[in-house]
Image (cartoon, grey):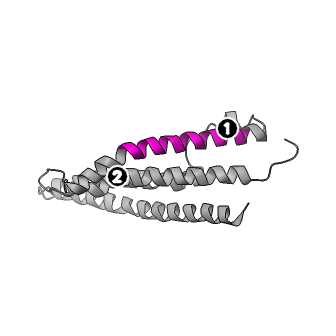
Amino acid sequence: MPSFVSAFILGITRINKFFFNIASLLIFVIVFSMLYEVVSRYVFNAPTIWGMELATLLFGPYFLLGGAYLLHLRGHVNLDLLKNKLSQRNQRLLDLFAYVIIIVFSIILFSYSFSPAMQAWDYKETSFSAWNPPVWPVKFAIPISVLLLGLQSFAEMLTVLYKEQDPQS
């Protein structure tokens, strides 16, 4: 594998691991805000105007930003029973096909999600609730996460392409 390809794969994977780690920390904020809301509502009869909305707004980025690194870890649902019955060559072809589909999906979803995120930024869009937080960070999580997913898929595709084949398959 050429060194620039190896550096690209390593760089994309490190970026996605960074976002994965950030996203994994969001669960603590989500749990704390929900716990605080439940305790204040049912114990002190003093519900917050922000607790559930914050948890709802953070769950999207939590879910989305971890996906690309999860692809690298092979943590997504896979048809291993079917795939393991295939030859090594056909497994590689199936992986390449899957990565191409993910890249195409990422391009389509990015093209449809970037414009609404920019509009939310331009118009300083808020949730229009009693708390009324800005929603552009949440809307930008979508194009950022699908861009990272597409790049990680491309990196995984390069890994499959440059991987040494077993001569017996």
Q: Which residue is mark 2?
A: 59
The part of the image, by quadrant, that contains residue 82 is: top right
Going 51% across and 41% down the picture, which residue do you hit?
104
Residue 90 position, x and y percent, is 74, 37
Crowd tier of the residue under label 1, counting other residues whose Cα lies within 10 Å: few below 14, some 14–19, many 20 or above:
some
Residue 152 has which mark? none
Q: Is residue 70 left or right of residue 81?
A: left
Q: Is residue 75 left or right of residue 164?
A: left
The answer to whether 94 is drawn above or below residue 133 in the figure is above
Q: Nearer the viewer, residue 49 or 72?
A: 72
Q: Which residue is mark 1?
A: 94
Q: Nearer the viewer, residue 109 or 88?
A: 109
Q: Secondary structure at mark 2?
A: helix
Q: Is residue 160 left or right of residue 115?
A: right
Residue 70 is one of the magenta-drawn residues: no
Going 62% across and 52% down the picture, which residue do you hit?
156
